[in-house]
Amino acid sequence: MSEQLSADFVVIGSGICGALTALQLLEAGSVLILEAGPRMTRDDVVANFRNGADKGNFVAPYPMSRLAPHPLYLPVNNNHFLQAGPEMYEAEYLRVVGGTSWHWAAQAWRVLPNDFRIKTLYDVGVDWPIGYDDLEPFYQQAEELMGVSGAPNTGSPRNKPFPMEPVAEIYAMARIRERIAPLGYDLVTNTTARNSRGYDGRPACCGNNNCMPICPIDAQYHGGLAADAAEAAGARLVPNAVVYRIEHDAAGKIVAVHYYDENKVSQRVTGKTFILAANGVESPRLLLLSASDKYPKGLANSSDCVGRHLMDHPSSGLTFYADEDLWPGRGPMSPSSVNALRDGDFRRHAAAYRIDFSNASQVRTVTNDLIKEGVYGAEFDRQLRLRSARQISMKNVLEVLPNPENRITLSDQKDPLGIPKPLAHYSIDDYTRRGADRCKEDFTKIARAMGGTGLRYSPDGKFGNNQHITGTMRMGHDPATSVVDAWGRAHDHENLYIVSTGVMPTAATVNSTLTAVALGLRTAHHILAQQPRAAAGASTAAQAR
Amino acid sequence: MNLPDLPAPRPNATRRTVLAALLSASTAALIPWALGEPVADASQGAFLALSAIIAGRQSLDAVQARRLYAALCADDAGFAAGAQALLALINERRIDVAVLQKTLDGDRSPLAAIPRKIATAWFAGTVGEGAKARCLAYETALNAQIVADVLKPPSYAYGAYGSWTKQPI
Amino acid sequence: MTPLSFYRRRMGATLLALGLGLTGAAASAQAPVDVAQVQRGQYLATAGDCIACHSTVGGKPMAGGLAVATPLGDIVSTNITPSQTHGIGNYTLQQFADALRKGVRADGRHLYPAMPYTAYAKVSDGDIAALYAYFMHGVQPVDAAPARRTDLPFPFSVRMSMGAWNMLFLDKKPFVADPSKSGEWNRGAYLANGLAHCTTCHTPRNALMAEDLTKNLSGGDLGTWYAPNITPDADSGLGGWSTQELVEYLRSGRVAGKAQAAGPMAEAVDHSLRHLTDADLHAIATYVKSVPAVHDAADTAPVHARGTASNGMAYQRGDALPADPDKLTGPQLFDAHCASCHQAGGQGTFDRALPSLFHNTVLGRSNGNNLVMAMLNGVQREQEQGDPLETRMPAFRKVLSDRQVATLANYLTATYGNPNVKVTADGVRTLRAGGGTSGLVTLARVGMAIALLVVLGWAAWLVRRRKRRSRRF
C-alpha cells in the first residue's frame, strides 16, 4: 500500500501538545498526525503493570516500538538516549500514540507572571517574548479541555474559575499542613488535571494511587484522550510512522516530511503547514537530522540554538518517619505542595523551587528497605506497618537556567532505522545547587515539625529528573538567539511551527505540560487567524487525502 | 514464559518423617503446621520450612509455595541445595530469625543470599534480579496482605471520590 | 447537555412566578391558578416520570421526541407541553384524562401502550385534575414538533388496531382501595400500579404484548435490559430484602451487598423515585413486598446472595498474556478491565462504593442480559454539578469484542454469581445492536396473509360451485 498522504496541516507527534493543537486546526482544513510509536490501550498497560517485576519502573509497562524506541534505563539500558555528561540526563519519554503524559502525575500548573521576566527582574536567564497576560486565555482554554482544578491564589492570576473544585485533601496531607503552618509553610492542594467530579465523560478520582505509571480509570487527563479527541473530530492519525526528515524547497519553505512505515519503507507526506510536536528531545533531533545543503546545521537553526539550552527540573529530596500514623497511599500520588518558594529576589543568586509531598504508597520501598536490612519474621510485619504508615517523602522541583552547553545533539551511533541517536550534554550549575542547599534547610525544618526521625537526604550533588524537557527550541524575538518566534513559528521557515515544552525559554518551577499546551493552543489560534477568509469556512472535518 | 508445573507432591509418610528429621526441636516448634505438609523432596521441604521461618507465618499458601519454589530454582540452579544447607545450619546453630541475615553476612557465608531471595519472593512477590526479575505475586504478596486492612495496592481503587479524607484507622 | 433535574428546578421557579399571572393555554378566561394544585401535579408527574419519555436529553422538558425502542420499532414521544400549536394546550380536562387513562388522543386516535396508559388508568380523578393543572400551568409551552414521528411497520401503523387490543387488555376500572389493607399499603398499591407504573417493565408480557398480571412483577424482558422479578420470592425476588432496604434502593438506586440500578431503572430512580417522599417510598415498598411470590425454577438460591471472593490471577500473576486479544482468559480480562475498581477478589472497596461482584443480583440472576448490558454501556447517574451525568462504571462497548464480553461474562457468573448463566458471542452481538426484533410483525403479516388466502380460497370455491350449478341447468 503506497497511498500518497497529504493534508493541509501535518502534525508530527500525537502527544498532548500535538493532538490538542491538531484538534484546533481541524477548523481550518484537513489534519494528518504522524506518530512514531504504536497505538496502545489503557487496560493493557494496567495489566502489564500488575504483572511487571519492577513496579517502580514507570516505562516498563508501555509497548516499545521496535523501530522507534524510547529510552529505557532499567532493568537494562537500551541505549536509545545516549549521555555525553558531565551529568546524566536520563529523561523518560514515551513514543506511543498519546505520548508521554499517559504516565504523569497530572500536575497542571500555570507559571508565575514573573517567570516570564527573570532577566529583567533578577538578571538571570532570559525574558520570554510574551507575557503572562498573552498566555492567560489559553491557559484557561487548556484547563477546560483537560479538566484542571486547584487551590485558588497560588500566585498565577486567573480571570475565570477552574472548571471544577480542587481534589479533596488527603488525611495525611491535612495533618502535614496543620503541623507545618506555624512555621510559615503553606501546604496547598496541587493544581492538577484530575477529576474532582464526573467530567468530560470520565469519572472522578477513586484513589487508585497509580497516576504514575497509569491511571486505570482515566480520572486524570492524558495525551491518549487528546489523540482520541483529535481522531474523533476528523484528524487522520497514522501510527508507526517514524518521521526522519523534513524536506524544504529552495526558498526554505517546508514542502514534505519523510517517514519510515512499519515495514521500513520510506513514505513522503506533503502539506501546507507543518507542526512539529515530537517532545523536547525528539523534535530537535529531527530538525538536526534534516540538515541539508542550504541548512547544514539543521532546519530552523540559523541561530545554532536547536537542541541548546536544555533544561529540566532536577530534584533532591528528604524521606523521614513522621511521629504519627499518616498512611500515604490513599488517593492521588502527588496531591500537595509548598509553592511559596517559587519567586523572590533570592532568584538573583539561587534557584527557586517547589516542594512536592508524595502520597505514593510506601509499601514497596519499605519492603525493599526491610529486606536489605535483613528484617524477617514477625518483626517484618511490625516494621512494614509502622514505616508504611509514617514514611513521608518530599522532593523539590528546582529551576535550572538556560545554558547553551546543555544540549541535545546527534550521536554517531544509529538506532534500528539507521538514524543517529540523540545525545545529551548536561550539567547542573551552582545556581541550581545553591537552590538545592537552601531547600535542604526547608526540608529539615519540615521534617522536624513532623517529629521526624530516620531522616534520609538524597545524596548531595545528585539529582533526580522530572522529564520536563524545556529550552531546546526556545522562543524569542531575535532570530539570532532563538528558534521560534512569539507564536511558535520557526524564524527560518514560514510554514513550520513547533508546539512543545521545548519552546519554553526558561523552565520556571512547575511542571511544564500545561504551559506547553497553552502555548500550542495559542499557536493554533494564531495559525487559524492567519488563514485566508475563504478557507476558514472550509469543511471542518475534511479527511487527509 | 510460564514455568512448567512441578509435580504435585504425594502424601508420603516416609517423606514427612524426613522433613521432621531435618528440623531441630526449636525449628520444628516454629512451624508445627509445616510438618504435616506433604513435600516432594527434602529441598522443597527445606524451602517450606525456611519460608515459614522467614515469613514468620503459621501457614502459607501451598500452591503459591510451589510456584515460588519453581521460580527460585529456575532462577538459581544452586537454590535447592542452598536451601537445604541453610536449614541445616539454622538447626545446628539454632540461629534466631532476628539475627539470621546479620549472622550470615558477618560470616560471609555463601548462603547469605538465600534468605533474601526467600524474603523477596514471599514479601515482595518477585524472584530474580535485573533483566531476569519475574513477578509471581502482587496483590497476594505478603506485603500487600500485611497492610490490606488500610491500603489497596497501587492500581486498585481505594474507594469513592473523597474517601481518602478521613483517618484510615 | 442539561440535566433533567436542572429543568425540574427551573420549573419550580416557574411555579413561583405563577403567583403573578397565568401561563399556558386556557389561561385567558380562567379562574386564578391554584398554585398548590399545580405543585401537587408536579409531584405526581414526577411519580409518573412523564419527563423520562417526553423529553430528550438536551431538549426542552415535555417537548417529546424521545424514540422508545420496542420490538416492533421505535415509538416516538409527543410534545405534551401546553403549546396550543404543537402540544396539548387545547386539551380539556376530559381529553387529558382520556389520553392518560384510556390511551385515546384528543383527535380520537389511539396511543400505543409504550405510553403506559394501562397503568395510568388507575389514577384518581383528583390526581388527574392536579396533573392537568400542572401541565397547563407549570410547564413551559414549546411551539415546535418533535424531530421524529412514530412510524411502526404495517399492520401496527394502523392505530385502530389498538382499539381491539384495549378491548382485550385495558382494565378501565380506576383504583379501588382494599379496606382490609392498611392506608400505607393502599397508597403503595395506588402508586406502584398507577403512576409509578412498575408493571410496565417488571411484569412479563403475553404474545400480544399485554402484561400478564397473573405473574405480576415477576420480571419483564425489555429487549436488552431485563426488569427483574421483584415479587417477594426468597430466591428469585426480594424475599431476602427488608422493607427499609427496598426503600433505600428506590431512593438511591443502590443497596450495598445486594444490588445497584443501571440502564432504565437508574433513570427511573434519578428522574422519579428519588424525588418521592419517604412515606410514598415506604408505601410502594410495603405494597411490592406483599404481592404473590413468583418463583423461577432456575433460581436455586437467593439471587442477591450468590458467590464469594475469588482471585483468579493469584496463581497466574506474572504469566505472559496471549498475543490474540480474543484468547485472553476470564481472569486475564478481569485483571485488565474489572479489578481496578471491583478489586482483585471481586470484593469491592472498603467503603463498598465500588461494589462487590458476589452478593450482587446482576451476577446472581438466571438472566445474564443486565450483566452484558452493564459491561457494554456502563452505569451513568445524574450528578448535581457540571456534566449532567457522572460515569460510575465505564462502558466497555468500544474496548471489548463480543468474544471478550462473552468470555468475561461467563467467568464472572461462574466465579461470583450464578454459574448456570451462559453468555455467547452471538448473544452479545444481539444485545450490542439493541436487542432482537419481535416476531410479532412477521406473525401478524403471515397471519394476515393466511387469512387473505383463506378468504380468497373460500371465494374461489363459492364461484366454482355457482358455475357447476349453472352448468347443470
Image (cartoon, helix red, strand yellow):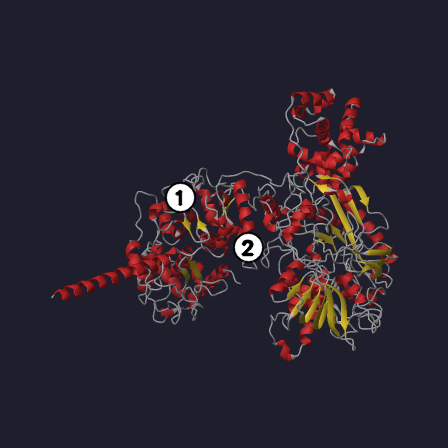
The chain identifier of the residue carrying mark 2 reads C
Instruction: Place residue C26 in its image quadrant.
Output: bottom left
Q: On the image, numbered disc 2 is attached to which residue? A: C397
Considering only vertical position in the picture, is C73 above or below B74?
Answer: below
Residue C152 in the image: state x and y as whole percent. Answer: 38, 63
- Classify residue A260 as left or right of residue C257: right
The chain identifier of the residue carrying mark 1 reads C
Q: Are marks 1 and 2 on the same chain?
A: yes
SS of the residue under disc 1: loop
Q: Nearer the viewer, residue C200 or C276?
A: C200
Mark closer to the observer (1, 2): 2
Instruction: Count residues near mark 2 (Cα–Cα under 10 Å), then give few for <14, some for 14-19, many for 20+.
Output: some
Q: Nearer the viewer, residue B3 or A486?
A: B3
SS of the residue under disc 2: loop
Considering only vertical position in the picture, is A366 above or below A250?
Answer: above
Number of numbered discs overlaid on the protein picture = 2
Q: On the image, numbered disc 1 is attached to which residue? A: C231
Q: Which mark is residue A379?
A: none
Residue C126 in the image: state x and y as whole percent. Answer: 33, 57
Amino acid type at image mark 1: Thr
Q: How far apart are the alpha carbons under marks 1 and 2?
A: 32 Å
- Classify residue C465 as left or right of residue C200: left
> Which quadrant, please, contains the C terminus of chain C?
bottom left
Q: Nearer the viewer, residue A516 or C167?
A: C167
Instruction: Place residue B108 in its image quadrant.
Output: top right
